[in-house]
Image: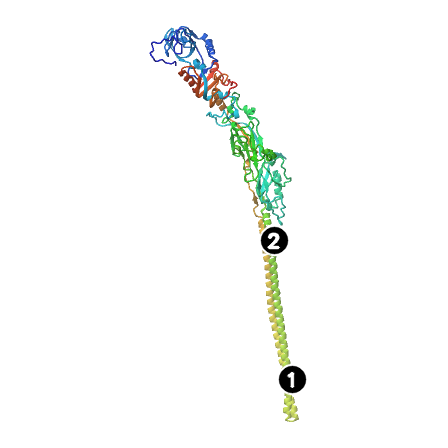
Amino acid sequence: MVNQITDPPNNYNFGLDFNYAVWTPGTSVSLVNVPWNNDYRDIVRFANKAALDSYIDDLEPSGVRIEQLSYIKPNQPVRINKPINTVVNYNYLRASNPLQPIPGNDVAKNYYYFINDVRYLSPNTTELVLQLDVWQTFGYDVTFGTAFVERGHIGIANTKQFDNYGRDYLTVPEGFDLGGEYRTIAKRSDDIMGFRQEGGFFQIETDVVVVSTVDLLADPGTVDNPNLVSASGNFVEMGVSGASVYVWDNLEGFLSFLSAMAETPWVTQGIISAAMMPKITRYDPSFTYQPNGIPTELTYIPKPKKRNFFSNWRNSTEITNAIPARYRHLKKLFTYPYMGIQMTCFTGNTIPIKPESWNEPNALVMERVTYVPPGRRVDFTPRKYNSDGRKPENFGGLSDAIVASVPEWQESGDDFGDYLDVSVGVTNFPTIPIVNNGQLGYLAANNSTINYQRQSADWSQQKSLRAAQTGYDQASSAMDTADAITATGVMADRNLTGNTNRTQVAQSIVSGAGSIVAGAAGGAMAGPVGAAAGAGMGALNAGTNLINAGIQTAANDEALAIRTLAANQNLSAEQWNRGFVRDTNKNLADWAARGDYANEIAGINARVQDAQMIQPSVSGQFGGETINLTNGSMEIALRWKLIDNATIKRIGDFWLRYGYAINMFIDNLPTDMMVMQKFTYWKMTQSYLLSSPMPEAMKQTIRGIFEKGVTVWRNPADIGTVDIADNQALGGISY
């Protein structure tokens, strides 16, 4: 609306300078129809006022030109001598006045108005309700200073918009609905543990890494003479391991080793860990393995590998062709959250990568490995992610001389980004249990004990047999002694009986002789005949004595024989009993000794036989993730994700029409406010007008136009007709 003058309204003299409030006599008015309107959603920026007037002049053949007007009051309707049916076809009015011959050097100026309403007064008189078009009237005289721009096409036209891959200018949040799910538009992957085809079968390309407390390269001996040598440890992975670490270059070699060591479980039971790991030659092609299943002692310094998964991917047609051609130039689609990169090893451990934060033109990934438990793993880190672009430090801050000896270390250190804090990897590699023969292990472990028990059983038997023989010999000796004693007694009895008999005979003889002598002597007293008779009687007595002596001797001999027989019979009975006791004791001792030995040996054999039922022991254990390996997806994968096409259309059309969110102060706004070929949208929070020769109300109106949001058009014919995608950025625009 035009300014209001509220002082006494009836005594103005408007013959001095023409302005938008008063039309002097002689003012010419052009009524036309223009495509912009008074809500200032769209304004046209002609090259200059002359171009604007030329545009209106070109419209006048279909419009109305009025030359004669009278004085009017400000902010009051204007009456023209035209029927309403004619005037109702127009929405815009230009008022032009000639230079007035008055003091003060009048200036010719055109004023432009929106026709807000038309009113019927008479058949040939129509009243117009007007509103000054502040932009077309005063906008060409405005010079913008610094402005805080919320949104606009200057973000699309900015030649520096993709500096730092869009991180500097294109990461202002927009607050859009991003749709349901991202779609995968590209993938790059690398097998961590691949497959090879051999004999119609697929074989896993893997190393087997074993940690053992036993020296696997020492002579194991046999089950009867086992040899167990403790591991001596080795230098591995920039450190020392007390247990020895070994590696086989394939599963076949490892199985061959296990087969060869099946009879020596006292060696394999020292294996505390066995795992399937990526091949060492993946990181060090010069590494050599022992052939034919012989374990290779692992003395390895890990070497990181920098891998380029996708060169210059932001300019790759594989990526750009996933975006509809209409929106392909909108570089903001190459930033998060519209595009993202998923880095995964398919183990449930995934990291999202924001494209603008990956400070590299290529998809560079640093791969690191450690083979020794408990932290065995393979890590993948996006190189220079969130880096400020500085040159990375070398690995571990080592001296240049050391780093030069291992080229892989030259650019594997801190990249001044998130470095190792943003990584994904495999930490749960498949582990292999080692089955040890429990019987052989028991026999080998108890070999000396079993031998001792056998020797002890044999000694016990020999000792028992020797004790039985000794008892037998002692009993036999006792029997021999009894025989000797009995024989001595019999002999003594015989000798005593003989002596008695001889004594009795001798006494009988002596007694007989005495009887004869005595008889003779007694008979002598009676004469010779008496002597003879006495002698005869004496002889008779002597004979009788001899007979009695003989009888007594015979009785003595018979008694001796009886005693001898009794003694011999008693001895024989006693000796038989003693022999029986001796023999049965010896037989019992021999039987017990043989039974004890057999029982002891049976006990030893039973333990040996029971050892056959000892459950095989297991070294290491089942573990790790095998589903990925068995399904051929043990890999590192990078997947480029993009919002779906329907969402791209919604967001892309919004950007094409209204530009990007800026939220920055810009101090070099273009004079004509155009950064695009056909239309440019501006939405400012705060703006400064450096040059604004106009009333303050007009100045504030222009500021308000841009702070509420406005589209500046170069050609009014394009308003509402042009395809919003047909609007290329002008060159040389930056902020």
Disc 2 crowd, CA 10 A, few/some/many (<14, 14-19, 20+): few
* Element marked by disc 1: helix
Residue at label 2? 451
Q: Is residue 92 visible?
A: no
> Residue 348: x and y, percent?
52, 34
Q: Are marks 1 and 2 in contact (CB under 8 Å)?
A: no
Viewer-nearest residue: 172 or 39? 172
* Residue 445 appears left or right of 169: right
Q: Is residue 254 above or below residue 174?
A: below
Residue type marked 2 = Asn
Viewer-nearest residue: 174 or 602? 174
* Element marked by disc 2: helix
> Residue 165: x and y, percent?
53, 25
Disc 1 crowd, CA 10 A, few/some/many (<14, 14-19, 20+): some
In three-dimensional space, the C-alpha distance between marks 1 and 2, rounded to whole angstroms, equals 85 Å
Residue type marked 1 = Ile
> Residue 472: x and y, percent?
61, 64
Q: Is residue 705 above or below residue 215?
A: above
> Residue 52: x and y, percent?
46, 11
Viewer-nearest residue: 10 or 190? 10
Residue at label 1? 509
